[in-house]
Amino acid sequence: MSSVPEILSTVVERALGAPALIRPCADTKFGDYQANGIMAVAKQRKENPRALAEKIIPQLDLADICEPPTVAGAGFINFKLKPAFVASQLTGEPVPQVANPKTIVIDFSSPNVAKPMHVGHIRSTILGDCLARIGRFLGHRVITDNHIGDWGTQFGMLIVGWKKHRNDAALVADPITELERLYKFVNEHGDRDEAKTELVKLQQGDAENLAIWQKIIELSQHEFAKTYQRLGVTFDHTLGESFYNPQLPGVVADLRQRGIATESEGAICIFVPGSEAPLIIQKADGAFLYGTTDLATLKYRLDHWQPDEIIYVTDARQKQHFQQVFAAGKQWLSSVPDLRHVYFGSILGEDGKPLKTREGTPVKLAQLLDEAEERAFKFVTETKPDLPEATRREIARAVGIGAVKYADLSQNRTTDYIFSWAKMLAMTGNTAPYMQYAYVRVQSIFRKAGNPAVLGHIELTHPAELDLAKHILRFAETLDAVLADDKPNWLTSYLYELAGKFSAFYDSCPVLQTPEPTRSSRLALCRRTADVMKQGLNLLGIEVIEQM
RNA sequence: GCGCCCGUAGCUCAGUUGGAUAGAGCAUCGGAUUUCUAAUCCGGCGGUCGCGUGUUCGAAUCACGCCGGGCGCGCCA
């Protein structure tokens, strides 16, 4: 089964001989879909667009699908779907698998070892996970990779701190906090030369320092895993910076040999068009930089996974860096896939400045999730005091975590956004709880009906039924659009409208008290709505619940 | 100095890549329930899309120039 725009495109393009540019109608009074391509063609051929549209229409064989198409405005063709067609489509497979699956590597989250994950990691983690879920759902081969920061100069300080100032009890209780303390302590009070010496020993393979380094990574990974579990995020690989470390000298040598990298002011640099400053891959003192690691990583991924596309989910400030890395990669490697920097803005406090705690430190992710759950728990306890506490906790978990994720994903990722508890946990408006509630209402109907409702024959008569049904059909095209531009906020908008249309239907179309055959038809419509809601929220990484 | 991003309703934001009369939510005002969870639904109010010039059948969207805000720019990641 194809999406409706695909069906319309195929038919129109056959007659037009050019892209049909099928879009949802700007206003539903015009119809359901419109073709915008006629005007472009008319311009090119110097024809009258309305006349061209009139000429095209008789060639369109769409009698089973929509009412006779009409010409409007400057040369639009409008299509109004027939209710019988909509009903028939509802019983098919909701989302077709892509015809040509791609291999997509998604690099996201990337926290630093020995530091707590903070709000800065939310967007990368949630966005990357969402894109991975959608890619897989559509049938692509997706490989997720957490490129953690597990190598670098900070280990000099950490090793000194570990050896001389470690508090084992604190390390057991809260490893990351203790590691952070050690780093800060040495940074402020320690001997820089000593840190440098330990770093060099580590780099030269000193057994004791290597063991400490590994232990620090292990402790950190264990903490990361807790957060990922809460968020329901998984990775296929966690190949951090250190993994590529042994490859760096070879990468630099190869780049120099090919004349792509050159020495300048003592450093080894790659100059790429479009930016004045070079990408430095080896410092004057011989050390490598993250650009070096990024190039080594690119080569590794190409060699091992043969991707068609690599997505890097990092904040917008790294834009220039990735432009340089991508440009350098294209000079260096013969066949480079579609490299995408999926960037995002910062999370700001309500004062419009980067979100910080009262003490001025970044807000820790774990604490943020705690607070979200706690706020949701308070609310559930107020509204449903009779539910057992365990149930209320479970609802609060799904609602709280869902709210945080939804608030982030519903925002256009390219801009900064203002973090607001009130807004994300609001039970009205474009929020996760609103949608979870809509789902709960459908489930309640099924419970009262005494069965989960099967997908049977659907008859669309009431305007609210038809409106809801048409929107359900737009699920597939929405997911295509999301993945084409890496913009999950289009999916959240879709789901918000779905929940709204369901609520309107719920309000005006009784289900269980209605006589057959309408009762079964409406139950089937509820079934399909619930399935799409659940699937859609699942693609955002948000759980549904049975009651709230 | 060079470069990137942003500016849309009182507030927070969409706007599918140049399409029709610019849309939501919040706030505010009004209405709806003997019926499946009112955490709901329906309606009203609210706009010089920062400003200007241009490109064309058509511009919030593209180009150029201003104004205002954010960010990045050779040896951190």
Image (cartoon, coloured by chain):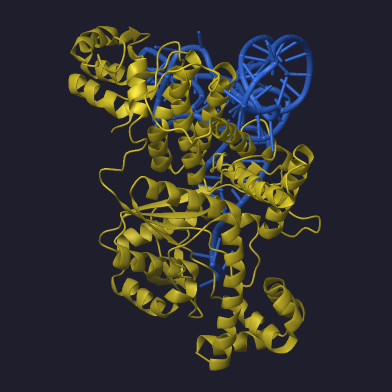
Chain colours: A yellow, B blue
Identify the image quadrant of residue B36.
Answer: top right
* On-image quarter of the N terminus of chain A: top left
Vertical order, A41 against A219 (above or below): above
Side of A269 relative to A396 (left or right) = left
Side of A506 relative to A75 (left or right) = right
**Which residue is pictured at 33% across the width and 24% down the height?**
A88
From this viewpoint, which residue is outermost toward the right?
A358
Residue A19 visible at all: no
Estimate the x, y position of residue B63 in percent, counting from the top left: 44, 32
Closest to the observer: A444 or A498? A444
**Which residue is pictured at 36% across the width and 10% down the height?**
A74
Closest to the observer: A113 or A205? A113
Identify the image quadrant of residue A186.
Answer: bottom right
Estimate the x, y position of residue A84 in percent, counting from the top left: 34, 17
Estimate the x, y position of residue B27 in percent, counting from the top left: 76, 25
Vertical order, A371 against A469 (above or below): below
Vertical order, A424 against A245 (above or below): above
Identify the image quadrant of residue A31.
Answer: top left
Vertical order, A261 against A124 (above or below): below
Side of A138 relative to A234 (left or right) = left
